[in-house]
Amino acid sequence: DHQDDGVTRVWLALVLLCRVAASFNNAIKFTESGFVLINVDVTEHQLSLSITDTGCGMSEQQITRAFQPFAQGDHSISRRYGGTGLGITVVQRLVNMMNGELKIESKQGLGTKISVTIPVEAKFSILNTPQEISTEDREILRWLKAWGVPHQSSKDQNTFNLVRSNQWQNLYPDHLLSALTTSRDPLTYDTGNRYQFEGNVLIADDDPINRLLFTKQLKQFGLNAIIVKDGQEALDILKQSDQVIDLVITDCHMPNMDGYELTEIIKSSPELSHYPVIGCTAEDSKLVVEKAERVGMNQVIYKPYSFNELAVALEQLLPATCIKQHPNQPWASNYSEDEQLQMASVIFESFTADKSMLQDEKENIKEVSHRIKGSAGLLGLTTLYRAAKDCEKDPNNAQKLKQLTDELNKSIESASIILKRLNLQ
C-alpha cells in the first residue's frame, strides 16, 4: 500500500534502505497464514515504512530479546525456521545510520508490526507526459493520480491508452514511471550520447508499458522501433515486411507465441536465421539460460535492465553498418587533456599503420587482426574489437576485412577529431 502524496523523487541512503527492506523477510518466514502488508508513506521530510503480518507475534520479553545480537524470540524458532537472530539488531543499526527510528508492536499469537521512519528530502512535482493518458486499470490509475499525471478512466482517440491486456501482466511502478517520463538522469544521457545507432529494431512484447518504454529508449539511441504484441505478429513481420529489420528483441513470456518459440522458428529457418535475437525476461534463473541457448537466442537481458545494459547488448548484436562511432571515444574520458593528446597521437599513428598492413596482400591478415583486437580491447572499442575478432577467425573473408577497415577508419577519424580539438593537427 502507498499514500498518494504526489512525491516523484526522494533523496536518501538507498543502499541502506534496501538492506533494511531485505531484512523484513521474517514477516513472510513467520507468517503461515493470513497476510503480510507493506505500507509506504512519504512526506516532504520523512519516509515511513511499515510491515504488518499475522504471524506468531512476540511478547514484551521477546521483543526486548530481539534487539540483542544472536537472540530470537525463543529457542524453538531457530530450530523451526532457521536463522541466527541478527535480524532486528542489524535493522536497528542500519536505521540509526540513517538517523531514523525503529518501532516494534506485537502481540503473541496475533502478529507483528514493524515501523521505520527516516528523514529524507522529497520532491513534489507533476510529471510531464507528451499526451494525456487513458486507462481502465484501477491500479495504473492509482499511480497516475499519485504522480499527478493527467489521465482519463476511459479510452479516447486523442490519448495514449495503457492497459494490462491479460493475466500475464504484472504492474511494475518503476517501469510505468520510466515509460511515462523522459529521464533526467545525467548518466542516462551520457550513455545515450556514447552509444548511437541507426536502423530498425523489431520489438515483440505483450505489455503496453514495456512497448512504450522500449520505443522511448530506442529512439534515444537513434533507432526506430517496430512494435508487435506477440511472437506470431513478429514472425509475420519478418516473413512479409519489405522493411529492413536489423535486430529482434522479444519478451520470453507472451500469449499466442512466446519468445522462445519465436526464436526457435527464426533460427531454424534458412530465410530468417541471420536475424540476431535478444530475449527479455524478469525471470533470472538457470532454466532461462538453458532455454535461451537451446532455441538460439543470441543474448538475454533481465528486467529491470539498466540503460547501459541495453546499449551494450545493442552494440554487440546490431550489424556493424548500424553502429555510429561517437567522436568522444570511451578511453578519452579517463585521461587529462595532455594524456588524451598522447593517446590520440599513438592511436592515430598505430591504427593508420595497421590499416596500411590490411591493404597489403603480403601481410598476414590474421596476425594484424589479432594485434588490432588486443589494442581495441584495451581501449574499450567494442565494435572495432568485434570486427577484428571476426576477421581474425576468417581472414580470407573480403566482407569481414572491409568491416574491420571501416571500423579502423572510424577510430582513426575519432582520434583525429580529438587531436584537432587540442590544436595539434
Image (spheres, grey):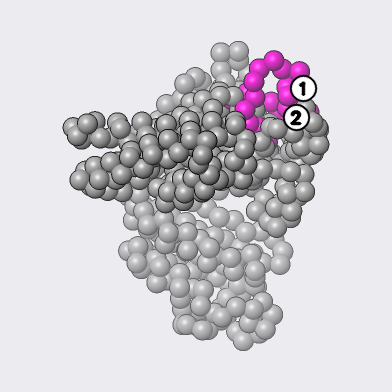
Relative image position of residue 400 (x, y in whole percent) = 58, 35
Q: Which residue is mark 2?
A: 272
- Identified by mark 2, the residue type is Leu
Question: What residue is shown at x 42% (from left), y 59% (from top)?
Answer: 15
Q: Is residue 327 above or below residue 68?
A: above
- 271 sits left or right of 44 in the view: right
Residue 153, given in percent of the width and then of the height, sits at: 60, 24
| Outermost front residue | 362
**Magenta part of the chain:** 225-250
**Who is closer to the viewer here, 352 or 22?**
352
Dot 1 falls on a residue whose secondary structure is helix
Q: Amino acid at mark 1?
A: Lys
- Is residue 252 shown above or below 113? above
Q: Does 318 appear in magenta?
A: no
Label 2, secondary structure: give it.
loop
Residue farthest to the bottom, as pictured:
75
Does the CB distance between marks 2 and 1 fall below 8 Å? yes
Question: What residue occupies the far top of the structure in this picture?
Answer: 157
